[in-house]
Amino acid sequence: MARVTVEDCVEVIPNRFDLVLLASHRSRSISAGASLTVDRDNDKTPVVALREIADETLDLNDLRAGLVTGLQRVILDDDMPEETEDKPVLNLEHGQEEAPQEMSADDLMKALQGDRDNDSSSRF
């Protein structure tokens, strides 16, 4: 049964790689509870997904868009606020704001040499 279904699907989606991606995506969505567009006829979920593709009961553009959206790692949200510059560090002892201090080249070299020698006395 599935072999004939795959042969029918290749006529609808000639690229077999695309066919596998779309059929597996549809199969997962059926398993998640999506409504069927063909009768199940005691077939397993992947066969039902292939039959839906072969019968062209699905909108392939919507299926492809859902696949791409599901594979995206970063979702851009327009509602997120823009990033702002860092605010000055708050000095908790005096309740005043002060700008972060920069380290001089000599202090940096002492700290790096102390790290190399496992000396914690020159750390900040």
Image (spheres, rainbow, N blue to C red):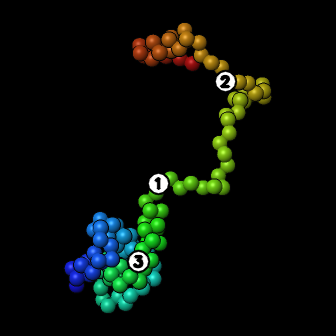
* Residue at figure coordinates x 45%, y 12% from the top left: 113
| Drawn side of residue 46 relative to residue 97, left or right | left
* Residue at figure coordinates x 46%, y 68% from the top left: 66
The reply to whether the C-beta atoms of the residues labelled 2 and 3 are less than 8 Å apart is no
Question: Which residue is label 1 attached to?
Answer: 73
Q: CA distance from mark 2 to mark 3?
A: 55 Å
> Residue 4: x percent and y percent?
22, 82
Q: Judging from the image, what secondary structure is the residue with disc 3 in? A: helix
Residue type for callout 2: Pro
Q: Quadrant of the N terminus?
A: bottom left
- In the rendered image, the residue lying farthest to the top is 106
Residue type for callout 3: Ile
- Mark 3 residue crowding within 10 angstroms, few (<14) / some (14–19) / many (20+): some
Please report whichever mark, 2 or 1, sits nearer to the chain's N-terminal start: 1
Please report whichever mark, 2 or 3, sits nearer to the chain's N-terminal start: 3
Q: Is residue 18 above or below residue 117?
A: below
Q: Nearer the viewer, mark 2 or mark 3?
A: 3
> Residue 40: x percent and y percent?
35, 88
* Residue at figure coordinates x 38%, y 82% from the top left: 56
Quadrant of residue 53 in the image? bottom left
Residue 100's label in the rendered image is 2
Quadrant of residue 116 in the image? top left
Question: Which residue is label 3 attached to?
Answer: 30
Q: Is residue 20 above or below residue 4?
A: above
Q: Is residue 20 visible?
A: no
> Residue 5: x percent and y percent?
26, 81
Q: Quadrant of the C terminus?
A: top right
Q: Nearer the viewer, residue 116 or 59?
A: 59
Q: Nearer the viewer, mark 2 or mark 1?
A: 1
Q: Judging from the image, what secondary structure is the residue with disc 1 in? A: loop
Please report whichever mark, 1 or 3, sits nearer to the chain's N-terminal start: 3
